[in-house]
Image (cartoon, rainbow, N blue to C red):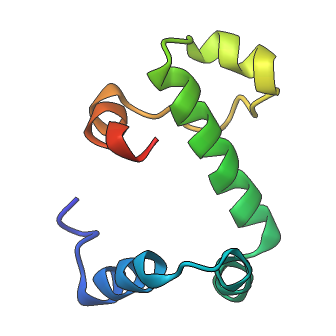
Amino acid sequence: MSDLRTPEVEDLLRVFAALDDEDTVYTLLEDLFTIREIKETSQRLAVARLLDAGKSYAAIEVTIHAISGTPAISDRRRYRHRKHL
């Protein structure tokens, strides 16, 4: 996690936190990431929410047709970020 906490990442977080208009968020996402990256990140969030709800990764793959190559979210990360789900 310490490698993640850089001034640039902190600035990115502040920018996202300050946005309150959905269209502006979409525009920023499209400026920063490819559509594929946005969709993959959205899928990871969906997986995190299902894991937090107690579903197994195997059940999640069946439920949302998750790509088997997508890394599972570790329990440590899942519980640390629970309030954001």
Name the spot of residue 43 as percent of width and height, x first.
69, 44
Q: Please tell me whether residue 83 is drawn above or below residue 31 in the rendered image.
A: above
Q: Please tell me whether residue 40 is drawn above or below residue 77 in the rendered image.
A: below
Q: Quadrant of residue 68?
A: top right
Q: Please tell me whether residue 37 is drawn above or below residue 40 in the rendered image.
A: below
Name the spot of residue 36 as percent of width and height, x first.
79, 63
Residue at position x 33%, y 26% in the image: 75
The residue lying toward the viewer, choosing from 27 and 67, is: 27
Q: Residue furthest front?
A: 20
Residue at position x 41%, y 76% in the image: 17
Q: Please tell me whether residue 29 is drawn above or below residue 49 in the rendered image.
A: below
Q: Residue furthest left?
A: 2
Residue at position x 52%, y 34% in the image: 48
Residue at position x 27%, y 32% in the image: 76
Q: Quadrant of residue 29?
A: bottom right
Name the spot of residue 40 as percent of width and height, x first.
70, 53
Quarter of the image for the N terminus: give it: bottom left
Count of picture labels:
0
Name the spot of residue 21 as percent of width and height, x first.
63, 80
